Amino acid sequence: MPGATAVGITFDGGVVFASEKRIAFGNFLVSKTTKKTFPITPKVGATCAGLVADMQILSLQIAALAKIRKMELKRDVPPNTVAKMMSNMMYERRYFPLLTQVIVGGVVDKPIMYTLDPLGSVLPDEYAAVGTGAEMALGVLDPQFKPNMTKDEAIDLAKRAVRAASLRDSASGDGLDILVITKDGTEEFTEAIK
């Protein structure tokens, strides 16, 4: 499995996802510019660790299914529905699994987040980290997360968690991708890891 670090945090009014940009297979650095955060709908997003090709195909297929579902329902598709669609797709492929760990979340009524393993288990949480740098990221998130943080506090905490992992995990690094989702929509930006 390639290394990575990705985190997700809920805050008062939304969710923030952050991931680093490096892809490494063993000692070989494959890419320094890989995007591992994905908007699925205008109010739901995801971030991943593992095989990025698997996450890319999963996010594209789920985004298409969510558009179809929105046309059927004539309202926004909630994050729990997107998480369940991902879970079903991953479980259907359990004998040839999509080798990716996913954090998916968003806002419809309130911010909510789920972590999915490669077989599709859905675990709700207020914050999460996945990938080879997850232990280091959780070492920052566990003592510093508090419910109902502001947007700026959540973004800052997500950046610090990924930076801490990048300092100790050789498979993580080369920049930060941040995706923020609120009831008003999505916002994406990139920063260097200092």
Image (tube, rainbow, N blue to C red):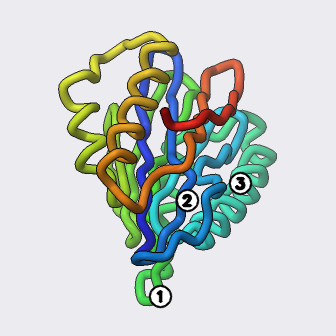
Disc nearest the viewer among 1 and 2: 1
Could you say whether the residue bearing mark 1 is in a helix, strand or loop? loop
Q: Is residue 179 above or below residue 182?
A: below
Q: Amino acid at mark 2?
A: Met
Disc 1: CA contacts within 10 A as few (<14), some (14-19) or many (>=20)? few
3 vs 2, front mark: 3
Do residues under tags 1 and 2 come within 8 Å of each other at their CB atoms? no
Give the amino acid type for the residue marked by disc 1 in the picture.
Answer: Phe
Residue 122, how many percent across, how many down? 36, 55
Percent x, y for residue 17? 51, 37
Residue 85 image label: 2
Mark with earlier residue (3, 2): 3
Task: Please name the residue that numbered disc 3 is placed on.
Answer: 63
Marks 1 and 3, Cα distance to the nearest angstrom? 21 Å
Res 85 quadrant in image = bottom right
Which residue corresponds to mark 1? 96
Label 3: few (<14), some or many (≥20) within 10 Å?
A: some
On the rendered structure, is 104 left or right of 160?
Answer: right
Counting residues from the start of the chain, the first of labels 1 and 3 encountered is 3
Q: Residue at x 34, y 35 (%)?
A: 127
In this picture, residue 65 sits left or right of residue 191 = right
Estimate the spatial distance between the alpha carbons at disc 3 and disc 2, rounded to whole Å: 10 Å
Give the amino acid at mark 3: Ala
Identified at 52% across, 23% down, the residue is 14
In the depicted structure, whether residue 31 falls above or below residue 35: below
Q: At which x and y percent is residue 112?
A: 44, 32
Q: Nearer the viewer, residue 38 or 167?
A: 167
